[in-house]
Image (tube, grey):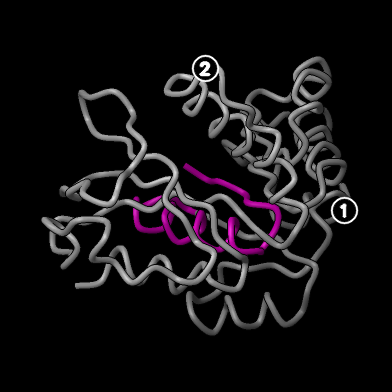
């Protein structure tokens, strides 16, 4: 499957790596020359410098033969435009857009975007299942103060398997807010919660601490 990823930030970077590992043909489109160069240096010729919102750029990267376009820039409007150009000018069968503001989800779907992904809504849905009366407005405020919501999967070979949450040296201001375990209801991690292989951890962390948090939870 040929997949075009628009946006070379952290989301686009990790998404591109994951899709390549799964054997897909992937091309990352990014405007920033430094990000593009660093990506090429690390992963090879998988990054094209250009504006994914422009039809000329999408034509140059072969959008006409793409099976999917995923727009994951930090700007909802840019993601919308990239998906619309891909869908209506190049007839890309499947478009997926990241949205930062959950209020944009309805309009994106009305405008023909096949799938929208809002990390805010994902977190809210899980927390509401656990704490239906708890106010979650604070989560939206945190996202505007240099924080982000991330998901980390505990690998079978990780040294954190079998450890309690209290034993982890988490970065300052980082917190584990949800644990997703196969065939079990989501739980709020406590100090004595024991991590298991394949657990998926939803955490809130400062932008600059994301790598440290991931390393802490997935160290081998």
Q: Are marks 1 and 2 in contact (CB under 8 Å)?
A: no
**Cα distance in 3D space between marks 1 and 2:** 48 Å
Residue 12 within the segment the image draws in magenta:
yes
Alpha-carbon neighbours of circle 1 within 10 Å: few (<14), some, or many (≥20)? few
Residue 55 vertical placement versus 170 (above, below): above
Report the mark closest to the observer, 1 or 2: 2
Q: Which of 160 and 191 is in front in this view?
A: 191
Residue 205 vertical placement versus 81 (above, below): below
Give the residue displayed 64% in from the left and 42% down from the top: 70
Would you say 196 lies left or right of 145 here?
Answer: left
Residue 28 vertical placement versus 3 (above, below): below
Q: Upstream in the sequence, badge 1 or badge 2?
A: 1
Give the residue displayed 77% in from the left and 50% down from the top: 58
The mark total stands at: 2
**x, y percentage for residue 61?**
70, 56
Residue 14 within the segment the image draws in magenta:
yes
Q: Mark 2 points at which residue?
A: 132
**x, y percentage for residue 180?**
32, 35
Q: What stretch is highlighted in magenta?
A: 1-25
| Image quadrant where one finds the C terminus | bottom left
Secondary element at tag 2: loop
Alpha-carbon neighbours of circle 2 within 10 Å: few (<14), some, or many (≥20)? few
**x, y percentage for residue 45?**
56, 73
Give the residue displayed 87% in from the left and 41% down from the top: 77
Q: Mark 1 points at which residue?
A: 56
Q: Residue 145 carries which label?
A: none
Quarter occupied by residue 63: top right
Give the residue displayed 77% in from the left and 79% down from the top: 33
Would you say 183 lies left or right of 58 here?
Answer: left
Would you say 42 lies left or right of 110 here?
Answer: left
**x, y percentage for residue 19?**
44, 52
Secondary element at tag 1: helix
């Amino acid at each position: 499957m040929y997949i075009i990823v628009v946006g070379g930030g952290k989301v686009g970077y990790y998404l591109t790596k994951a899709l390549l590992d799964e054997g897909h043909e992937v091309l990352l489109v990014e405007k920033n020359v430094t990000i593009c160069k660093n990506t090429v240096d690390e992963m090879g010729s998988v990054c094209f410098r250009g504006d994914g919102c422009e039809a000329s750029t999408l034509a140059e990267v072969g959008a006409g033969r793409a099976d999917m376009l995923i727009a994951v820039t930090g700007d909802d409007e840019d993601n919308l435009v990239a998906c619309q150009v891909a869908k209506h000018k190049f007839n890309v069968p499947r478009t997926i857009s990241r949205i930062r503001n959950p209020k944009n989800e309805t309009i994106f779907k009305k405008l023909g975007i096949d799938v929208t992904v809002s990390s805010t809504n994902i977190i809210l849905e899980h927390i509401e299942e656990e704490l239906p009366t708890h106010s979650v407005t604070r989560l939206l405020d945190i996202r505007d103060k240099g924080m982000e919501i991330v998901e980390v999967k505990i690998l079978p070979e990780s040294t954190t398997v079998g450890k309690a949450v209290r034993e982890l040296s988490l970065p300052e201001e980082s917190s584990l807010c949800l644990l997703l375990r196969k065939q079990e209801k989501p739980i709020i991690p406590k100090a004595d919660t024991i991590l298991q292989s394949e657990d998926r951890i939803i955490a809130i962390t400062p932008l600059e601490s994301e790598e440290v948090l991931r390393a802490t939870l997935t160290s081998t």
